């Protein structure tokens, strides 16, 4: 059983990206009987597209779980739907800022997550980790990666199960943000974020 | 050197109070060369007043750090000022709900914290823990305890250093809250809350 | 030129619904050379579906603008996308609470709004009215109505232009909410909400 | 009966200040049998101090109501208490940024508002205007003006009734803010803000 887990490099005003640290942590771990492939994607629309296409073609993973930072959210967010659209409020890391552009001309307008999102949310809550189903993954590189993975699944049959999880800021990011804007900003420490992603993987393997 | 640390029992719609758990954790620990007295106060205006007066008279602590839950705040909040007023938005745990009542007729309108609040905030931030100076401790039992401790310090000279720290929800509390109201609610895990309180104690001892 | 504008009756803990008041206001007005049909829909999944289907069949409107309340949002929200799913966090007004049910078996997973959403947002901002494009209309009766109108447009060619606009609370609703939960809640007065909907109609007519 | 009403000029990243517009509006109006003196204060610690001292000495007002902008709050906030402290998170308009400095050496640590704050809040709510009693006016120039007016009242007996009211952003300010940070930001239009201040004046005159 092959599981692909991707995170992202930092972007915009964020000097670190918690998903990069989650990937580091997962890369060093062994989960029973499964092979985990990890990758930290660039926050660049075109490059993320190419790299993800190559990863899926090379590894043919059974499961793909894509991770991204949702600035300001307080909970682990299991994304429900990906939209066939790029519409960026800020430029990506190579200064490209698409407006209302389609991702795939032969793709559906939207795909629904193929992860057991409600089962994962329930399990996380049982473990005391704030978690929700989210109805929007935005229209930035996070949505792109989720869309492309589901498009690939629909076209080629794998990854059979794929979807996207947004995570909150780390506490140390909030410290830094607070100094400049003085607002109430939620966070969740890395140990709980890693635990949440492991639970998501295990729950997906079982269903 | 004697240090009094108080927390509170649960109140209102909260089934647990993180400060009760912090007190449990501190009670089991030894800090170099100091004697820590802990107490979990009732969220009852009159009883909290009596118990605190007795604790101060009995132990004559050098330092008193009082802890309370600030529902919805994202950061460890070092309170700056206590006001000579009770004005409760919800009844206390014995159903008493004072409106615009003074705490002490011979007390000042307000007392400023005698903890090194900015030094503590800076140290917590260095350690990656979100922290702020807060300009209001409310007018509920938290403010009462802070006021009484500072009033005692002003009248009798001890505790020489005293003040109040508000802490965020624990993650497991947010899970429960979220199910009923669906909103973005910040939290901070117990290990970071305990670490923050220890840093506050150590920083106060040194200054 | 026929324009259908729908609002909703109150639901959940809301005693009034601003969109019902907007409909009242529009029903009394004349806009140059166009015929406005108004309707206040029930917040009931099945009935809203039936009534909307009948309205579209009877009036064959060129344009349909559907309105709903987005509790807690601060801006006039032009919804971008409707999803083929009902997933209700609270029961509807006849106590039906669908979970992960499709709206139309022969419909697409999602439809994009056929209103000029960005042009409307820009025009509203020029007029000093806070406005955004929103990427989720939720999965309650609001999303159902938006989805069905776009499904009808895709199947039958009319309404040629249709979409959904979410509005904030009215100030008087916030007064009432605040008394029970004490939080910071955004609002926008009725006169600005009515003005915003008129601008949306006019902008759609012109494009 | 003489009433002094003050507002502030814009400051920090705000290009306009709603209280300046409220002052403009009040200056053109006549309220039954009372003389209203208005002034727009600079957001400069030392100058605001001097100008306010001169206004009080010159006019000897019976009532003084001071207004300021509270960025991000959703309600008309009747401030309860002013603190004998300046502690600025951002520099004032002449680049002075005091840290933990007293306002008056011979003043109390705090003064409580001498306006009928709860009666005003209740009246505003009856009129459908979101309103709260706030327990902190910050420690910037707003708090300074409130403190100095109450200090003057305590020392010299006039203004007999004085206090501070914080107002939300105007809608047009939120439009501009939103473009740069994309967040949910509450606002209240000028007509409701002016109405709220008039109600506060009338309620204070009657009590």
Image (cartoon, coloured by chain):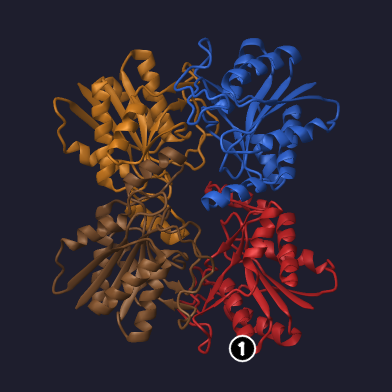
Chain colours: A brown, B orange, C red, D blue
Front position in the image: D65 or D19 = D19
**Place of residue C186 in the rendered image (x, y in percent of width and height, measured from the top left):** 59, 51
Can residue D185 be seen at all in this image of the molecule?
no
Q: Quadrant of residue A179?
A: top left
- In the rendered image, which quarter contains the C terminus of chain B? top left
Q: Secondary structure at mark 1?
A: helix
Residue at (80% x, 30% y) in the render: D27
Residue at (72% x, 67% y) in the render: C203
Q: Is residue C31 left or right of residue A3?
A: right
Can residue C69 be seen at all in this image of the molecule?
yes
Q: To which residue does mark 1 refer?
A: C155
Front position in the image: B51 or A92 = A92
**Place of residue C190 in the rendered image (x, y in percent of width and height, measured from the top left):** 72, 56
Front position in the image: C193 or B50 = C193
Please tell me whether residue D156 is drawn above or below residue B31 in the rendered image.
Answer: above
Q: Quadrant of residue B26?
A: top left
Please tell me whether residue B104 is drawn above or below residue D106 in the rendered image.
Answer: below
Q: Quadrant of residue C32?
A: bottom right
**Place of residue D162 in the rendered image (x, y in percent of width and height, measured from the top left):** 66, 23
**Subunit bearing disc 1:** C
- In the rendered image, which quarter contains the N terminus of chain B? top left
């Amino acid at each position: 059983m092959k599981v692909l887990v991707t995170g992202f490099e930092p972007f915009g005003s964020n000097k670190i990206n918690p998903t990069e640290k989650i990937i580091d942590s997962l890369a060093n771990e062994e989960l029973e009987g499964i092979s985990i492939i990890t990758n930290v994607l660039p926050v660049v629309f075109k490059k993320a597209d190419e790299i993800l296409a190559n990863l899926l073609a090379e590894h043919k993973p059974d499961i793909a779980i894509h991770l991204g930072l949702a600035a300001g959210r307080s909970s682990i967010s299991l994304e429900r739907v990906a939209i066939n659209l790029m519409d960026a409020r800020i430029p990506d890391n190579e200064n490209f800022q698409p407006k209302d552009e389609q991702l795939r001309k032969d793709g559906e307008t939207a795909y629904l997550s193929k992860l057991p999102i409600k089962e994962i949310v329930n399990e996380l809550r049982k473990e005391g980790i704030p978690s929700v189903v989210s109805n929007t993954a935005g229209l930035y590189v996070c949505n792109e990666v989720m869309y492309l993975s589901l498009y690939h699944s629909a076209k080629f049959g794998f990854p059979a199960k794929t979807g996207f999880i947004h995570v909150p800021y780390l506490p140390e990011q909030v410290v830094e943000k607070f100094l400049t804007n003085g607002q109430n900003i939620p966070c969740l420490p890395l140990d709980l974020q890693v635990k949440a992603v492991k639970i998501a993987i295990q729950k997906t393997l079982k269903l």
